[in-house]
Image: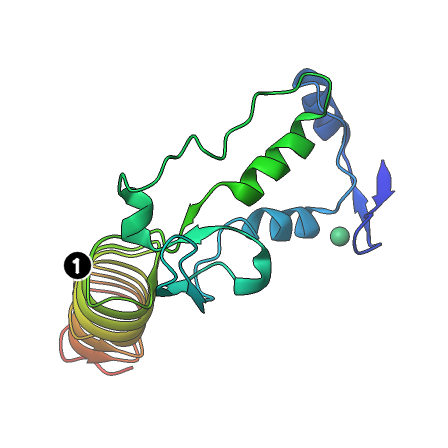
Amino acid sequence: MTRECQNCKVSFEITADDMRFYDRIKVPPPTWCPECRMMRRFSWRNERSLYRSKCAFSGKDIITGFAPDSGLVVYDRDTWWSDKWDPFASGNEYNFSKPFFAQFYELMRKTPLPAVFNARTINSDYAQHTGDFKNGYLVSASWGGENVSYASRVHESKDSLDVFFIVKSELCYETIDANKSYQAFFSQNIDNCVDSAFLFECRGCSNCFG
Ligand SMILES: [Zn+2]
């Protein structure tokens, strides 16, 4: 079956297999195309856009993933996790005569949210979805690192810049998907490589170029 996406107006296919699956889990078939549905899901997780704003509890300046004009109630991260406020204060009794999503929307708009989703970070104000991190700047979705800037998906790595998805690595620059690598520049999909540059799909290289 072909349908027109209600959002972007592109036509998309719903296969017989898809229909059987929707029947089985008792949901209606989608009205948006796969790309628009993907964007809608992604809009729930903002990793890389940060805003200057004010904590709605104390008025203190904060850096947050929620836009100041979003209408959402945002608390400084440490305040949100503290016992200074009552999380039940924004609660409502569920009204069975009203649709669930309308009530969920109202609840979401008045319930405080933490400015950032970080844990145990030091000097890493411009980080999001990041934990156990020291001196991180514009770092997202990373866990365990030190002295890393302009990066995402960094795990147990340090002293690196402009990197994406590096694990247990050090002194990397412009490198994507590196595991246990040291001083690797402009490289991609590498494992156990040291003192090298411009590598692609390499394992156990040292002093290699290109
Ligand atoms: Zn669409």
Q: Is residue 130 visible?
A: yes
Please tell me which residue lies in front, 77 or 44: 77
Q: How many discs appear? A: 1
- Using residue 145 as the reference point, say whether residue 86 is left or right of it: right
Identify the residue shown where x is 81% and y is 48%.
Answer: 5
Identify the residue shown where x is 55% and y is 51%.
Answer: 42
- Using residue 67 as the reference point, say whether residue 95 is left or right of it: right
The spot of residue 67 in percent (x, y) is: 53, 63
The spot of residue 153 in percent (x, y) is: 33, 58
The quarter of the rendered structure image containing the C terminus is bottom left
The quarter of the rendered structure image containing the N terminus is top right
User: What type is the residue that disc 1 sits on?
Assistant: Lys
Q: Is residue 162 above or below residue 16?
A: below
Please tell me which residue lies in front, 196 or 82: 82
- Name the residue beneath numbered marker 1: 168
Decide: few, some or many residues near mark 1? Use Cα within 10 Å; few <14, some 14-19, many ≥20: some
Q: Is residue 93 above or below residue 185?
A: above
The spot of residue 142 in percent (x, y) is: 29, 57
* Color theme of the render: rainbow
